[in-house]
Structure formats: structure tokens, C-alpha cells
Image (cartoon, rainbow, N blue to C red):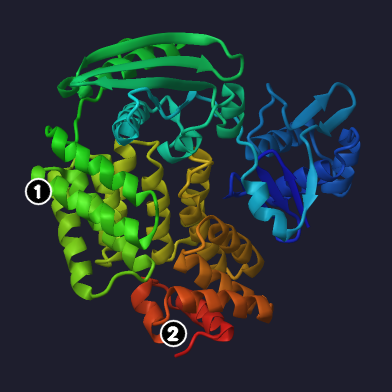
Amino acid sequence: MLIAFEDCVLDLDRRELQRASTVVPTAPQVFDLLAYLARCHERVVSRDELVGTIWAGRVVSESTLASHVNAVRKAVGDCGKQQRVIRTVARKGFRFVAGVREVGSTDLAATVSATPVLPAKPSIAVLPFVNLSGDPQQDYLADGVVEDIIAALSRHRWLFVVARNSSFTYKGRIVDIKQVGRELGVRYVLEGSWRKANDRVRITGQLIDAATGEHHWAGRAEGVLGDIFELQDRITESVIGAVAPELERAEIERARHKPTGSLDAYDYYLRGLAELHEASKASSEGALAFFHQAIETDPGFASAHAMAAWCHSWRKANGWMSDGAQAQEAVRLARRAVELGKGDAVALTRAGHVLGYLAGDFHAGIGLLDKALVLNPNLAAARYLGGYLRLWQGDTAAAIAHLGRVMRLSPLDPELYRMQAGMAVAHLFERQFDAASVWAEAARRDFPGFLLAAAILAASQALAGRTLEARRAMAQVRELDPGLRLSAVAAWLPIRRPEHLSVLLEGLERAGLPQ
């Protein structure tokens, strides 16, 4: 039986608490106390009733009971001051006041993606800027400005910044700022516009409190296209100053690192990113071509090297890589990216994943991804790709923690299917086949062409005894990659722990994948 409330799921059968898709360790009596209060949410539960039920009538001091209630509140993200989940009723006892719903395992994916709770620290989403130039071909330039503003804001550890991909789900839409705030779980929203005429650029922006609709700041910056990075810095500084007047800031130190000094290389790079977000075989080829053009234009462009390398790894994950020479080229590009971009979080993220996935160097790959998170704690890709490397290495608990956190950081991410597929793999390895099926099905819905999601769905359905569903999923696997065989799985996925590889192979064999 599952009980869901806010961003938490309480699994009474497994005696497990998940918060934002991450398992929260709880002591036995703390779990029992939480479960009892949740099941009795329609009434106030007295102290005597709790002692009699949880402690079987043993003598328990007021301080012991209070410490356990506090532990419950901490586990679910509540506190004695807010009492958002558990309320103390004076001289009566306690009441569980959060909205409760009982769900089945098939509702798990929807449950964990419920409306996010506002973080404790200031939070912001930067929406895609409206292109007022009248030329849709300039969209990628406006998008690049927004991406750089998000990256600059993310370097400030006191600020929670929603990842680029979730923000960009609102592109081209007329939005209600309050609704955006609720859906993304943020207090502030930055929106703006971009206009280019000849070589001159004007960027305008306004910062809005998503809870009240109040405007905190509005401004603009303009200049020639060659000064675009300076304009972005000016907008970013103004936003930070508007968001944090209460933080007693001494001075805002802006990170002025620029990915390249060449606007032509930057242009190719942005075009490559736009292609890559399409997530198809053809678009991955187009993205790779653009990244190589960026490298040719500026051989010192670290992020372009890293993204070209990562294109190859994405192609291998989907069965689109034709030979081993491409994997070797990807590793070469990744190592060059690390040499060039020791302070570039994007370069370290993509290169680190490639070195772990394609070169099998998990230690170096995880180290680079952790360094990327030091440079940019809000970089969603660093978290979910770090989750994957830990998953292949065999640390499923750490993988689930990373993937759960990134889904909170970027709850509407168009690449959410990659995170969901990672959760599916982790639950399969943990032999939680129902949960693995739910996550895999969610990933497949978002991207039907994702080979990994289809394979995990087939394996988990087979191991759960759902033969018909497993055969249907296997038919899609065979359609996506007709050449995939059981003997090739170990080369396709770098699974280190034999028991993890064994459970996957067993499931795929039962589903009908040939030797």
C-alpha cells in the first residue's frame, strides 16, 4: 500500500519513505509514527494513543515523543514552525494535515512528479525570451542569451535555479506567471525579450514574484552584437540584486567566464544544441556536424569538444553508433575538452560522462561530474549523468538520490525521459519490478524511440510475470535495434556488478531477446 502526500510517498509494505523520488532513511519507530499519523489523518491523535500504539504502552517521556515527532517532520520536509504536514494541537495531540491519497504502484510515476514544494532558499526560473526581430531564424540566439543567464545565476549557491530544459517547455506559449511558479516550484520568474536590428541588440527583462504577481525589477540592456556577453552580465547582475536585497550581500561576484571569444563558433554551438534537443538519429547527426564546425572555428572551445563527444555517447545508447572508431573519437574529444575546460562545468559534465560510459573510467568520470557540480550546483545534466555513472558502477542508492534530486531541479525537463529511464534501471537492479515498469513506461511515453527504456520495460514486465506486456515491449526493442542480442548487452551497457547484469539478462531472455 502506498500513501502519497506533497512530494512524498510512504510505502507501507516495503517500510520505505520517498521524498522527491529519493529514499529517506528513517528509524523504525519514526516510520511507524509517520505511518500511523498519516493513516489517521482525519482526526487528532492523542499523545497517549501514540505511546500505546508505537511504544506498546511502555513509559515514554514527553521529550522522547517530541524528538520522534521532530524526526518525522524533518524526514518529510516539515518543521515545528511551519507545521505544514504535522500540526500540534494544544493539549490534544497531533494531526496529520497534509493532503493524503492512497495510490497503487501504477500511479507511482505521477505521484513523484507532483507539484514541487518551494525550496527554503530564493528560487527562480528564467523563461525563454521572446524574439521580437521578426526572424524565427534568430531564435537560437535569443535562446543562447537565456541559457547563459541561467548558467550565471546557477553559480550562486544561495539561489535555486530551475534547469534550462524545464524553463524552455514554456517557449512560444502565453503563460500565467503564477501558474509557472506553481508548476516549477519557484518564487521568482524572469521573462524578457530580444530584438536584433543589423548588428545592434536590445535585451529587456522583468523579474516577477510568482506568488503575488508583483514586479520586483524591470530593465534593459543594449549594444552591438559583439558585446553580447557584457549585456548578459548586466542583466544577470540586475536580477541577482533584485532577488536578494535581504541577504546582506557585500558584493556580487559575477563569473565572467565565456565559452569562446568567437561569435561564429558560438553560433555553431547554439545551433548544435538546438539540434540535439530534438533527440532523434537525424538531429544527432546534425548536432555533431555543428559542434565540429564550432571546433574548427575555435579549436580551443571546450564545450564544443565535450558536446561532440557526448553526441557519440547518445548515439551508442540508442544503437545508432556504427563502429568502435566513433567511440574512440568520442573519448579523444572528451579528453581534449577536459584539457581545455578545467573551469567549464558544461565541458566537464559531458566529457566526464563520456569517459565513464565509453572509456569505462568511472572514477575519473564521476570526479569530473562532481567538480562540475562544485562549479555549478544547479546544472541538471551534471546530476542526472552523475546518477547514470553511479548506476552503472553499482551504487543504486546514490543513483536514485541523484536522479530524484534532478527531477526536482528540472520538473518539466524535455529530457525527463532520460532521468525516468535511469530510475527504471535502478529499480530493476533492486528487483523492484513493478516500480521499474512504471518508470520505464513513463520514459517511453515521453520518447518512444529510447532503446534503453524499451529494454528495461521488456525485462521488468517479464520478471514481474506479465508475459504479454513483456513480449509487446520486446517487439519495440527489436524494431528499434534489430541487431541487439543478449551477448551484446554487456558491450552496450557498462554494468559493473554481475548480479545487476544477470537480472537484466534474465528479464530480456524471458521477454524474448535472442542469444
Q: Residue furthest front?
A: 134
Near-viewer residue (256 or 450): 450
Would you say the residues marked 2 and 1 are in contact, meaning their CB atoms lie under 8 Å apart?
A: no
Residue type for callout 2 = Leu
Give the spatial CA distance, label 2 vs label 1: 40 Å
**Which residue appears at 78% of the width and 36% of the height?**
99
Picture coordinates of residue 119, whole percent (x, y):
55, 29
Q: Using the image, determine if residue 266 lies above or below residue 188.
A: below
10 Å crowding of disc 2: few (<14), some (14-19), many (20+): some
321 with respect to 241 (left or right): left
Q: Which mark is residue 296?
A: 1
Q: Which mark is residue 486?
A: 2
Q: Quadrant of residue 340?
A: top left
Label 2 sits on a secondary structure element that is helix
10 Å crowding of disc 1: few (<14), some (14-19), many (20+): few
Q: Quadrant of the C terminus?
A: bottom left
Please say whether residue 499 is visible from this viewpoint.
no
Q: Quadrant of residue 5?
A: top right
Q: Using the image, determine if residue 460 lies above or below residue 281.
A: below
Q: Using the image, determine if residue 190 lies above or below residue 144.
A: above
Label 1 sits on a secondary structure element that is helix
